[in-house]
Image: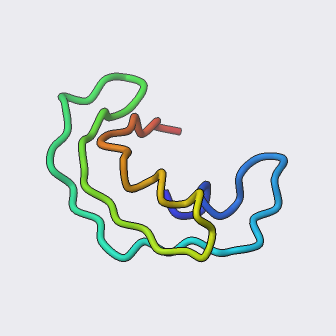
Amino acid sequence: MLYPMNHPTGVTNSDPITITTFKKEGCDNPTPRGYNCSFTVIVASANIGASMYNNVPSAFFYLE
């Protein structure tokens, strides 16, 4: 999760983002594509746009 935050496609991130807190809350049953999990995350960065990650309650994690 941290790598895509710091290396968005086509954009240079001049202010690194760090995850200060990450708490996994639960995941749905896995599918052939991956997992849908909810979590609480708190990030820190000089980039004010990074605070948007504090409002993301879940994500789909794909299997490769």
Snapshot quadrant of residue 17: bottom right
User: Foreground: 62 or 10?
Assistant: 10
15 relative to 49, above or below: below
Q: Residue at x 53, y 39 (%)?
A: 64
Find the residue positioned furthest to the front.
Answer: 48
User: Foreground: 6 or 45?
Assistant: 45
Q: Residue at x 24, y 42 (%)?
A: 38
Q: In screen coordinates, is 15 left or right of 10?
A: left
Q: In screen coordinates, is 52 left or right of 9?
A: left
Residue 46 in the image, given as x and y percentages of width and height: 60, 76
Residue 8 in the image, given as x and y percentages of width and height: 71, 52
22 relative to 39, above or below: below
Residue 15 in the image, given as x and y percentages of width and height: 69, 74
Tell me how many marks there are.
0
Q: Residue at x 20, y 39 (%)?
A: 27
Snapshot quadrant of residue 16: bottom right
